[in-house]
Image: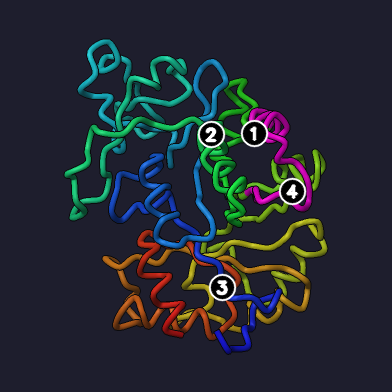
Amino acid sequence: MNRSWRTLDAQPTRIIAHRGASGLRPEHTLEGYRLAISQGADVIEPDLVPSADGVLFARHERVLGRSTDIAQRPGLATRARVDAAGAHEWFAEDLSSAEFDQLRARQPFPGRDPGFDRQFAIPRFTEILALARSHWRQGRVLGVYPEIKHPLELSARGIDSTALLIDCLQQAACIGAASPVWVQCFELAPLARVHQAGGNPVFALFEADAIAGLPWLRALHRQAPWLAGVALPKSAVIGAAGNGDLLAAAHELGWQVHLWTLRDDSVMADMATVQQEYQALFALGADALFCDFPASAVAALAAF
């Protein structure tokens, strides 16, 4: 590509396979990650939740009813309990790792292909790292970008999911500033622990209502200069409420900006097509984009 990129490292925007190729396969499955890698994704992104016996599995939420077949599993279907909202749900931390291994993934998004439901197991984080390592041995530069899910809620239940993650990284020799494993979380304290454990790049996630322009960004940098960057909703920088100056300001602070989530089947109101979203974000210098359809993202990058 003969183009000058406005990213922090002047390299093309990295494509993050959000929950794998989650637009085409049930999210957070080895099969979905493999498809994303074959489509050219630079990074695979597992969300991590712990089992009762301290094994990290890839699920977007602690509750399992929406994305697994637990309701159809004899012996597990009766394990639901009432959540804070009064709904009956199954929680990851109530299942042993052996029980987790019985589950199969389902497509949680209405309108997406359910044809692969109940075919694929729920992977352990160690399996995802092993998949990545198989590509590293072949010389492929492939990032892994786990999110620590709900660490404060889990801590209240006596589960230290941050320690479980750090242990996995140490066991897999994936600790260090040069590691291809980055870590993300909506809470700063777990990220500080990961960073202190060995220096892995860590990124703070923020919802749109927490973002308050350039003063907020600079205050965050004073509070947590050890962050490698921030991961924000795409609406923070494009669209009617977006502020493209956030990207340039973050780069001035030495931070990357990752943006979520681009979906072929859900385009923001201000844009006509997902390709228009990609073009706008590439032009601003987004360092990485979370994408449900990695093949579309790779094609958009090639066309930019």
Query: Is residue 173 a member of the stretch shown in magenta?
Result: yes
Residue marked by disc 4? 200
Mark earlier in primary sequence (4, 1): 1
In this rendering, position of residue 229 left or right of residue 274: right
Residues at marks 1 and 3, CA–CA distance in whole angstroms? 27 Å
The residue singled out by tag 2 in the image is 125
Image: magenta residue range: 163-183
The label nearer to you, 1 versus 2, is 2
Provide the secondary structure element on which disc 2 rests. Answer: helix
Q: Which badge, 1 or 2, comes first in the chain's sequence?
A: 2
Above or below 85: residue 147: below
Q: Is residue 71 above or below residue 15?
A: above
Residue at image mark 3: 13
Q: Residues within 10 Å of mark 2 (few under 14, many from 20)?
A: many
* Camera-nearest residue between 85 and 119: 119
Outermost residue on the top side: it is 75
Give the Cα distance between marks 4 and 3.
20 Å
Q: Which residue appears at 46% of the width and 77% of the height?
A: 301
Is residue 276 inside the magenta stretch?
no
Q: Amino acid at mark 2?
A: Phe
Tell me the kind of residue under disc 1: Leu
Identify residue for label 1.
Answer: 165
